Image: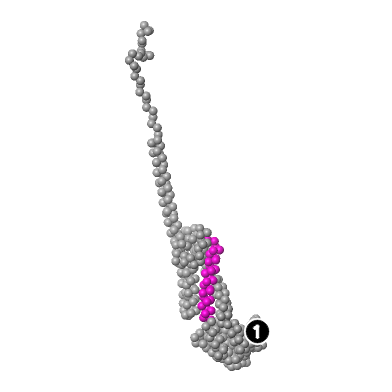
Amino acid sequence: MEKENKKIGFFTRVKIAVTKLENYGVFLEEKISIAMKYFFLIVLILSAVIAVFQTYDMMKVMQKGYQYIQNELPDFSYENGNLQFSERIYAHDEEYDIYMIADTGEEITEETLQKYKSEIKSTGVIFLKNKAFYKNGSLEIEYDYQKLADQYGMTSFDKTGVLQEIEKIGMNGIAITIFFVMLFSIFMVQFVSILMDWLIMSLFALIVAKVCRISMNLKHCFNISIYALTLSIILSMLYNVAYIMLGFYTEYFRLVYLLISYVYVVAVILMIKSDLIKQQIELTKIVEVQKQVHEELKDSEEEDKKENKKPEKEDKPKEEKPEGSVSKDEPDGSEI
């Protein structure tokens, strides 16, 4: 059985996991390493698909940003830890709802900075003389120019140099870089998240098996739980793509995601129990048939013994005495 299971391809496993719950028994006795390999591959594929659409969406923003820098953005330059724009900038892209504010004059007050932050309703960047702020909803990140310059080995640049560097790398090169960065970050997040769901679901499967009085150890529960998560993982991928491309969002998705997986686990365990009951019934029938056959054979042997038993020897008939013969017991006259 184990050798046959190793021949099951990845996409065949996905098909069984989603549509053939009655065949989950083939996964029970597999090594945990096979389940881990399946887990790694499905998370990698999930992350790659999301990264592709995320990269595509970001490249549209990058392309539009490149055109903005090239055609509309005023001249700017960086040197000795200070960024300088030729004029104050306030820009808002309605399509992507992105804000850009640049005020690189003298040091601004905290009140002015808070005003700039309040003007960013969704996502945006604020460029000051010696630092920048990235804001996305309630998330705020501060970047120090000098630290970034030291990290990447930059001493100075200007608008012309930035445009030349972008052209040198090319949009395809930027897209590939973004894809691998996104793939790594998405994979790490999904790996940890799905692994936690997998472990919790394995414990849940063990409890359900105990309640149903089925002999299943943690390895068995561990094996079937990852396959029970398959449909939820696929739906998660589709949901993320819909969110990236269409902005579709529902706060109940996480609940539905987990509910589907737990229903799969319960259904699989009940099917396994049903199969065990059927096997027990079949075994009982086989035992009864064997017992009946044994009794019939025993009766047949007894009948054969009776038929083959030799009849008892009959008494030989007495020989008739010929006339004129004298019996030994009768007197012959000689004793007179």
Picture quarter with the C terminus: top left
Q: Is residue 218 left or right of residue 330?
A: right
Residue, x 48% and y 74% (percent of image)?
A: 238
Indicate whether 303 appears above or below 154: above
Indicate whether 307 appears above or below 91: above
Which residue is denoted by mark 1 in the rendering?
A: 154
Q: Does the segment drawn in magenta span residue 32?
A: yes
Residue, x 65% and y 87% (percent of image)?
A: 156
Residue, x 60% and y 93% (percent of image)?
A: 86
What secondary structure is marked by label 1?
loop
Amino acid at pointer 1: Met
Magenta segment: 29-58
Give residue 161's quadrant in the image: bottom right
Crowding at mark 1 (Cα within 10 Å: few <14, some 14-19, many 20+): some
Q: Position of residue 31 (x, y in %)?
A: 54, 61
How would you classify the magenta stretch by its main secondary structure?
helix
Q: Position of residue 263 (x, y in %)?
A: 45, 67
Q: Does the segment drawn in magenta span residue 41?
A: yes
The total of numbered circles placed on residues is: 1
Q: Position of residue 148 (x, y in %)?
A: 63, 83
Give residue 33's quadrant in the image: bottom right
Indicate whether 85 appears above or below 251: below
